[in-house]
Image: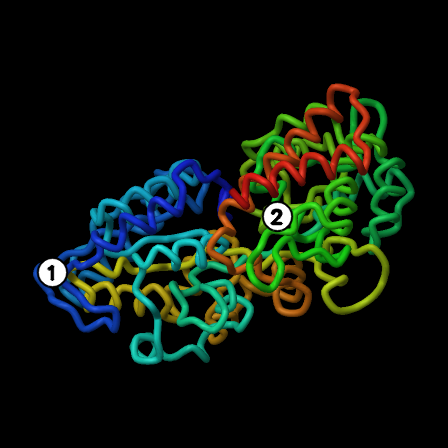
Amino acid sequence: MRRSRARNAVTVTLAAAMTAVTAACGGGSSTDGEGSNDNPKELTYWASNQGTSLAHDKRVLTPELKRFEKQTGIKVKLEVIPWDSLLDRILAATSSGQGPDVLNIGNTWSASLQATGALLPWNKKNLAKVGGAERFTPSALAAAGAPQKDPAALPLYSLAYGLYYNKKMFKDAGIDGPPATWDELVKDGKKLTGDGKYGIAVEGGDPVENSHHAFILGKQHGADFFDPSGKATFDSPGAVKAIKQYVDLIASEKIASSGNAEYAKDESVRDFAKGKAGMLMWQAAANGLKANGMKPDEYGVAPIPVQARGSGEKGTRSMVAGINLAVFKNSDNIDGAVKFAKFMTSDKEQRLLNETYGSIPPVKSAQTGKAFETPDLKVLRDVLTSSSAPLPQVKDESKFETLVGNATKELFADAAAGRKVTSESVKKELSAAQQQMRK
């Protein structure tokens, strides 16, 4: 994305949404998908902004919605919603009971929105209507709701983080290939830094982007951010090491520009595409790089480096990123909504839409074809399959993204201002975030 991942902060509390939704979700349908059908010929669909603009998404989706209408007789009213307002819109809808029939959600929100009770559970009966759980990749389905519960949504677009590197800048600096460990990344970054250019570009002003890197590096340092009971553990030693390591790209290593501390709207993608930075850690960046004038043969993609060559959680290179498709439980057209979900997760639509957006189909049988065999998608698909982990599937996950992401943003601001970032200052910020979470 482009903004293909969940990138906005929570400004409406989920606790309030959960209280209000209990009364609001009586609707005309039951939770097993057998509901009333007051308006069987129409659906409303909130789509997330996946393309280069809202208009781009409308151009992509409108012909497909027309195809669905031709097949079923059901008209779909489309609204494409920017990422910076999508979650607020969803939470307001769960509180009021006045929402769309079908909507896109960032997969990291799945457990949080599941806890409101507003979304249709995809139990075995409902999953059978779209071909069954076995159609979807396990990692994508694992990011569709809390463990031991029926999924709250269906995987629609899958994404993973990768390390993008500028081939010419690497060659000019005498670097043979992408770094495999974090020490190598820093070493290469220093070779690339100078004459107004930097080793890596980061999006330090974006809390959600920060939280994703905190999670990935946290896993590498053995931190989970929540204990098994769901209690926040933001200031654990591993979490402190992870976030200091990320902030140190500006603070002590100085291989990222201090101006990156304020970046929050894909500026890092632009800097990388324009040759101002030699590396970028991003999700499915191909479309964004193309939009900024960078050709595919000018960059390579590798897995994000780990601390040292190893295995298990300490080898985590990405969170399981992507977009899920959900149905509001109080829709008066549950049957039509489930048909639409089946259509959007069909092999044909999965190939078409994921190819257009540069993402990976979470439907296994749709992953074939040249479009998904490009060098970058091969790397990202392997990362997604073998070395990624879902963000904590707990009801307060959205608050984690906001609180830890903002704590990291403040630390980046300190680094940019020349204030020393220490393990103690990192722990202080994370402890404050943890206290806010536990209130």
Residue sitting at the far left: 38
Q: Nearer the viewer, mark 2 or mark 1?
A: 2
Q: Measured along the vertical axis of the image, is residue 214 above or below residue 74? A: above
Q: Earlier in the sequence, mark 2 or mark 1?
A: 1
On the image, the x and y values in percent for residue 104 come to 37, 53
126 or 361, which is in the foreground?
126
The answer to whether residue 408 is seen in the rendering is yes
On the image, the x and y values in percent for residue 11 come to 42, 36
Residue type, numbered disc 1:
Lys
**Which residue is drawn at the image coordinates 39% and 43% (left, top)?**
87
Count residues near mark 1 (Cα–Cα under 10 Å), then give few for <14, some for 14-19, many for 20+.
Answer: some
Which colour assignment does the render follow?
Answer: rainbow
Instruction: Name which quarter of the figure residue 261 lies in.
Output: top right
Instruction: Name which quarter of the figure residue 150 lies in.
Output: bottom left
**Which residue is drawn at the image coordinates 71% and 49% (left, top)?**
163
Badge count: 2
Q: Measured along the vertical axis of the image, is residue 251 above or below residue 280? A: above
On the image, the x and y values in percent for residue 438 come to 54, 45
111 or 288, which is in the foreground?
111
**Which residue is drawn at the image coordinates 73% and 30% (left, top)?**
276
Count residues near mark 2 (Cα–Cα under 10 Å), then give few for <14, some for 14-19, many for 20+.
Answer: many
Are the residues at dot 2 and dot 1 in contact (C-beta closer than 8 Å)?
Answer: no
The answer to whether residue 289 is seen in the rendering is no
On the image, the x and y values in percent for residue 146 come to 47, 65
**Which residue is drawn at the image coordinates 81% and 38% (left, top)?**
423
Q: Is residue 110 left or right of residue 173?
A: left
- Residue under circle 2? 212
Residue type, numbered disc 2:
His
- Residue under circle 1? 41
**Label 1 secondary element:** loop
